[in-house]
Image (cartoon, rainbow, N blue to C red):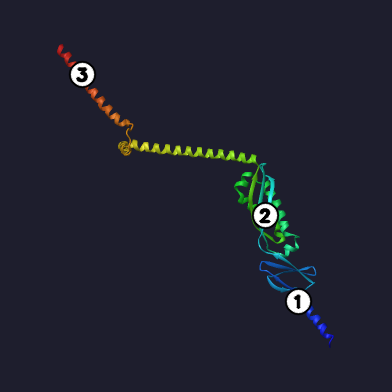
Amino acid sequence: MDFLLPIFCVLVVGAVIIFVASIRIVQEYERGVIFRLGRVQGAKGPGFFLIVPIIDRMVKVDLRTVTLDVPAQEAITGDNVTVKVNAVVYFRVIDPVMAIVQIEDYRRATWQIAQTSLRNVIGQSMMDQILQDREQINDTLQHIIDESTEPWGIKVSIVEIKDVELNSTMVRAMARQAEAERERRAKIIQAEGDFQSAQKLSEAARIMNAEPGAMTLRYLQTLVEIGVEQNTTTIFPIPIDIISEFLNVRRSSDDRKSASEKLDATTGDTAVS
């Protein structure tokens, strides 16, 4: 019986070691892909579970969203402009088994696909489109990369272009173009303002012409506004309508005087005869 005790202790210690070796704990954001004798058995987790030591092997896969920086890629746009563009890609694993079985290193593969896709999309786009319509380019990149990584169990959620670098010659040319565009818009706005002002003045002139008293009221209103100012000398043009009234009165008086003189002359000539 004495020789059984060491054997029992060895068995107990061996059982404990095997039990400890079979324990696996997977975090909430992880999954454990189980291989049994080289054949995949599926993904387990999160939490605590047991595997068969030596026979089973587990590979952990992180399911959290990964931020992947794409370094600056030099490309020639559709209108023959050389640019350097970098981007950031957000992706996550949605199928742990495919991410392990279908690709050796899904992170590096996604990184390479993002670089080549970025160069291809930039090469097919115009310079103005890259600068002004980034949202469309981002959507195109996201669709292309996601379609390429889908067989690996990868879901690309967001692709964003961060910076667009231009050479100094192109920067100066774009600055001159922007300045010319601003001057063109300023001239158009000024011309539209002059046109609207002329329309309003023409409309006001028609209204005043239709109402004889309107011009007089406007004249008196202007006199009141000028009187408020503390000026020593005020030059104010007299409306032609007021002057014409005086001219008409003067002309009528001259006509009556001429007629009277003619009548007197005629009467004198008759008396002499």
Q: Secondary structure at mark 2?
A: strand
| Disc 3 residue type (three-letter) | Glu
Quick one: label 2 or label 3, which is nearer the N terminus? 2
Q: Secondary structure at mark 1?
A: helix
Residue 236 point in image, percent of width and height: 33, 32
Q: CA distance from mark 2 to mark 1?
A: 42 Å
Answer few, some or many: residues within 10 Å of disc 2's Cα (few below 14, many 20 plus, some between 14 and 19).
some
Position of residue 219 in the picture relative to residue 16 (left or right): left
* Residue at the image position 57 percent from the left and 40 percent from the top: 178
| Disc 2 residue type (three-letter) | Asp
Residue 143 point in image, percent of width and height: 66, 55
Q: Is residue 236 above or below residue 89?
A: above
Q: Is residue 34 above or below residue 245?
A: below
Residue 230 point in image, percent of width and height: 32, 37
Q: Is residue 270 above or below residue 158?
A: above
Answer few, some or many: residues within 10 Å of disc 1's Cα (few below 14, many 20 plus, some between 14 and 19).
some
| Disc 1 residue type (three-letter) | Phe
Image quadrant for the C terminus? top left
Q: Which residue is mark 2?
A: 69
Quick one: label 2 or label 1, which is nearer the N terminus? 1
Q: Quadrant of residue 37?
A: bottom right
Q: CA distance from mark 2 to mark 3?
A: 109 Å
Q: Which residue is mark 1?
A: 19
Which sits in the foreground, 144 or 175? 175
Image quadrant for the N terminus? bottom right
**The disc label shown at residue 212, or none:** none
Q: Quadrant of residue 8?
A: bottom right
Q: Which mark is nearer the camera, 2 or 3?
A: 2
Which sits in the foreground, 263 or 21? 21
Q: Which residue is mark 3?
A: 261
Residue 39 point in image, percent of width and height: 78, 68
